[in-house]
Amino acid sequence: MLLQATKDDLTRKENILSRYYDSGKVLGEGSFGQVSVYVNIRSMKSYAVKIVKKSKECPEEDLEALNEFFILRSLKHPYVIRVKEIYETDSSFKIVMDFLEGTHLAKFLFTRPRMEATTKDIMQKIF
């Protein structure tokens, strides 16, 4: 089933995250944006928030990115990070996801002996 994202599917408020979450340290940055730790003010639970910059030249890219976010939000698998909420501002999309303490997958795999076997095991569990 292909999910088509629409503007109605989003919570569109500039500072909505600051109402419900306290921002923390930046976990990583890339060419499209950054990922930071946010803490839910009520539950004190940590979440990873991916802030993806919108394309200024190509709105179609934004719609493609939204479709990917909504597909991720629909997935329910123990080896896939859960997307909790998706917010939109004038300049970015903010994707609230489960936060896992530790390291990212690539670093984990490259620091392990028998990386090929480990990778195979992980990929078989995912797929």
Image (cartoon, helix red, strand yellow):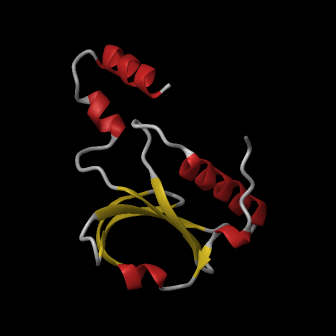
Name which residue lies at 23% across and 25% down: 112
* Residue 68 to residue 111: above or below: below
Q: Which of these two is toward me, 68 or 60?
A: 68
Residue for point 71% across, 54% down: 64
Number of numbered discs overlaid on the protein picture: 0
Give coordinates of residue 113: x percent, y percent.
22, 19
Residue drawn at x 72%, y 60% is: 63
Question: Residue drawn at (34%, 37%), measured in percent from left and top?
Answer: 105
The image quadrant of residue 43 is: bottom left
Tell me if residue 111 can be seen.
yes
How far from the left and from the top, in percent, is residue 85? Answer: 50, 65
Instruction: For residue 58, say whether it is visible.
Output: no
Q: Is residue 82 above or below residue 89?
A: above
- Displayed quadrant of residue 42: bottom left
Q: Is residue 96 above or below residue 106?
A: below
- Up-down relation of residue 121 to residue 92 (above or below): above
Q: Is residue 105 left or right of residue 4?
A: left
Work out which quarter of the rendered image holds the N terminus and state it: top right
Percent x, y of residue 87: 55, 72
Tell which of 109 and 1 is nearer to you: 1
> Position of 25 compared to 15: left or right?
left
* Side (left or right) of 59 relative to 93: right
User: Where does the image place residue 9, in percent across and percent down from the top left?
Assistant: 66, 67
